[in-house]
């Protein structure tokens, strides 16, 4: 009997990407040394897992869910109760395994709720998930013994004997715990996309009728995908419970479900790494920007509208399009037109920020000073010269965008046509 030995070349690009991701997680605390950097990095890590789990439904399965926070929130509640029991010595669960309890709880509720929600698809599925999240949120206020009422459930993550001096009291230790779970979860969710279930999930998303015609039960495909997604959502909830040491009804609210939808869409639902970009932007807009301005929700709404209008594929699609042009050696041809459009957008954005902040300052003039410091300059809401300056900056940027965008689109269209033609020749 002859044995056939097949040589499979090593995928160096994939190993390089995953190694770089691991190194970035290790080095992030050294790169960002601001006082609140570790807290922000920890929030970004948990939100990345949450966004990736949500993208398993929306990006890979085409299931628009308005209630995904149910699985992360309930996972967080079970995780924090497990922390309290473990600290009391009633269950022997070390803190690094608490996210696993959150994941199992999320998966259990995915089995329970998913069987009902995945009976339908499309708009009906979305409406059922919206009703489900409102139901669970109402229950969180009706059963205070488990959910803690409006105050929530709090805990202490420092319990048990320290192992090698690690007791997870310092934030840096919590960050690295989140980083380890983030890396493991990201690898597992990426591997899921290459499984038969992940592949047929894409087929159900694109053409459910054809998938049924070849013998697949589309409801079971959606159901199993939701269960896997709920597990990783529960893991993110468990990590959130460890990070904040408190879980409230807000964790199972429709607001949190809407937030993960918003950030995942901004990052790009058509790409695996899109939700990771969305998590970074989401933490910046909701945490960092809210400390800088009271108008942060307005900026978030404007940014989302611009993404929907000009980049429906999200930030990830813009990155991939530029990388494709770069890979074919044509970046130099679009560099100057792109620079002109980008500078015009920056100028218009500065003018818009000046006007928004001055309007907010004017509305608060009775309770605050009529002077604000913005973009390195001092503006007064009582000075017509400053209002005129803000309008001129905004109009100049808008005019530049209107003037330079058309030549840029012409060059962009020509370059992409040449790339498509080159691809056709290589395939032929």
Image (cartoon, rainbow, N blue to C red):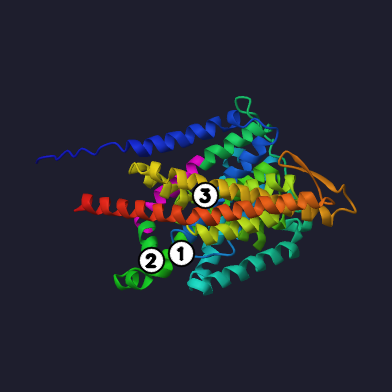
Image quadrant containing the N terminus: top left
Of 23 and 178, nearer the camera is 23
Q: Earlier in the sequence, mark 3 or mark 2?
A: 2
Q: In the structure shown, which secondary structural element does the residue marked by tag 1 occupy? A: loop
Q: Which residues are magenta?
A: 183-197
Please state the horizontal and vertical placement of residue 39, each as a whole percent of the image: 67, 39
Q: Is residue 212 left or right of residue 46?
A: left
**Residue 20 visible in the shown view:** yes
User: In terms of secondary structure, where does tag 2 sit?
Assistant: helix
**Magenta span contains residue 95:** no
Q: How many marks?
A: 3
Quarter of the view holding residue 174: top right
Circles 2, 1 touching at the beta carbon (< 8 Å) = yes
Going from N to C along the chain, the mark reached first, 2 or 1, is: 1
**As rendered, which of 188 and 303 lies closer to the eye?**
303
Q: Compare residues 398 and 295 and report the one nearer the observer.
A: 398
Q: Which mark is residue 62?
A: 1
Whole-Å distance between the Cαs marked 3 and 2?
35 Å
Q: Which residue is mark 3?
A: 341
Task: Looking at the image, tell me whether mark 3 or mark 1 is earlier in sequence order.
Answer: 1
Q: Residue 42 location, x and y as percent?
A: 62, 40
Mark identifier at residue 31: none
Outermost residue toward the left? 1
Q: Tell me how far mark 3 sits from mark 1, CA to CA.
A: 34 Å
Q: Residues within 10 Å of mark 3 (few under 14, many from 20)?
A: many
Numbered disc in front, either 3 or 1: 3
Q: Quadrant of residue 204?
A: bottom left
**Res 101 seen here:** no
**SS class of the residue under badge 3?**
helix
Q: Which residue is mark 2?
A: 206
Give the image location of residue 116, x and y in percent: 52, 71
């Amino acid at each position: 009997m002859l044995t056939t030995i097949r040589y499979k070349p090593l995928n160096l690009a994939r190993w390089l990407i995953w190694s770089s991701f691991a190194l970035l997680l290790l080095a992030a605390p050294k790169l960002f040394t601001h006082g609140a950097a570790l807290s922000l990095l920890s929030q970004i890590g948990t939100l990345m897992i949450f966004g990736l789990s949500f993208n398993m439904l929306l990006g890979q399965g085409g299931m628009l869910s308005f209630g995904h926070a149910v699985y992360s929130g309930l996972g967080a509640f079970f995780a924090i109760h497990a922390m309290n029991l473990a600290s009391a010595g009633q269950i022997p669960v070390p803190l690094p395994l608490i996210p696993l309890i959150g994941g199992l709880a999320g998966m259990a509720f995915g089995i329970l709720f998913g069987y009902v929600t995945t009976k339908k698809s499309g708009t009906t599925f979305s409406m059922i998930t919206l009703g489900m999240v409102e139901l669970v949120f109402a229950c969180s206020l009706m059963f205070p013994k488990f959910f803690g009422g409006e105050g929530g459930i709090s805990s202490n993550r420092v319990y048990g004997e320290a192992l090698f001096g690690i007791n997870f009291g310092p934030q840096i230790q919590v960050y690295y715990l989140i980083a380890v779970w983030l890396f493991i979860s990201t690898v597992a969710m990426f591997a899921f996309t290459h499984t038969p279930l992940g592949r047929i999930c894409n087929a159900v998303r694109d053409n459910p009728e054809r998938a049924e015609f070849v013998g697949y039960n589309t409801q079971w495909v959606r159901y199993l995908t939701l269960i896997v997604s709920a597990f990783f959502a529960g893991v993110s909830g468990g990590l959130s419970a460890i990070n904040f040491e408190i879980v409230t009804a807000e964790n199972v609210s429709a607001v949190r479900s809407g937030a993960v939808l918003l950030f995942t869409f901004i990052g790009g639902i058509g790409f695996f790494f899109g939700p990771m970009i969305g998590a970074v932007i989401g933490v910046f807009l909701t945490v960092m920007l809210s400390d800088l301005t009271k108008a942060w929700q307005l900026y978030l709404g404007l940014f989302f509208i611009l993404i929907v209008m000009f980049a429906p594929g999200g930030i990830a699609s813009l990155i991939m399009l530029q990388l494709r042009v770069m890979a074919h050696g044509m970046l130099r041809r679009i560099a100057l037109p792109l620079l002109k459009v980008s500078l015009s957008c920056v100028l218009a954005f500065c003018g818009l920020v000046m006007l928004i902040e001055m309007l907010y300052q004017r509305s608060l003039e009775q309770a605050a000073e009529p002077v604000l410091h913005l973009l390195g300059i001092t503006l007064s809401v009582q000075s017509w010269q400053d209002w005129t300056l803000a309008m001129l900056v905004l109009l100049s940027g808008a005019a530049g965008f209107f003037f330079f965008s058309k030549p840029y689109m012409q060059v962009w269209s020509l370059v992409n046509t040449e790339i498509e033609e080159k691809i056709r020749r290589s395939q032929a």
